[in-house]
Image (cartoon, rainbow, N blue to C red):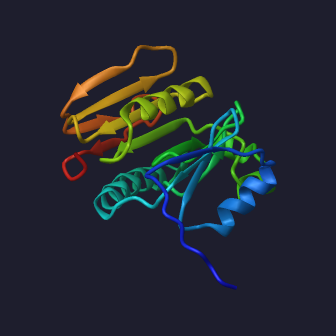
Amino acid sequence: MQTAAIALPSTLELKIDLTDEQFWKLCQNNRDYRFERTAAGELIIMPPTGSETGNRNIKIAAQLEVWSSQNNLGLAFDSSSGFTLPNGANRSPDASWIRRDRWDALTAEEQQGFAPICPDFVIELRSKSDSLKELQEKMQEYMENGARLGWLIDRKNQRVEIYRQGQDVEILENPATLLGEDVLPGFVLDLKQIM
């Protein structure tokens, strides 16, 4: 089988009508790209992250996974995990976490694909090519679909936007740590090597 390489902009949005199964197959057949789909059905194609951002993403995911494994309150997910939100969008936060009781309520089949659930907690790490406005809209979408806490880590502006359901966004300038509050009790994200 021959393959053809195509040059894509940093993000590409296409309106394509795909069933959930077709979207799943598209993602499985093109593992070098991250795909998301908006609630309106627009396909967003994102190339792999740069090495520096990937390194910072793993530091975030590792801290979240260590905390999650120690307390067994839920499951942590990395940036390659996709979820189908209640509004129909397919999203892949840079790191996320779901309470165990909510995860266990899904069928084994639902857990295998893009789980039909919005994580309780999401993190988005802004890379140099990311639009701040688009990430802010994505964070609002998570909140509107059931996320209880979200952190938008904006290295470019050295700040973190904290999203909580039903509350105004809180902005912290160059914080050293972030607390998981009542959503992630006892979790502290060390930002020294991330910001």
Q: Quadrant of the C terminus?
A: top left
In the figure, residue 14 lies in which quadrant? top right
At a point 45% along the width and 37% down the height, the residue shown is 184
In the figure, residue 27 lies in which quadrant? bottom right
**In this rendering, is residue 46 above or below 134?**
below
At a point 36% along the width and 53% down the height, the residue shown is 63
Most extreme residue toward the bottom, as rendered? 1
Q: Quadrant of the N terminus?
A: bottom right
Residue 127 x %, y %: 33, 48
8 with respect to 36 (left or right): left
Q: Is residue 69 visible?
A: yes
What is the total number of numbered labels drawn onto the structure image?
0
Q: Is residue 107 visible?
A: no
Residue 125 x %, y %: 36, 44
At a point 33% along the width and 20% down the height, the residue shown is 170
**In this rendering, is residue 170 above or below 104?**
above
135 with respect to 112 (left or right): left
Residue 130 x %, y %: 38, 43
In the figure, residue 151 lies in which quadrant? top left
At a point 53% along the width and 66% down the height, the residue shown is 6
Residue 150 x %, y %: 44, 32
**In this rendering, is residue 27 above or below 157?**
below
State the residue in front, 51 or 163. 51
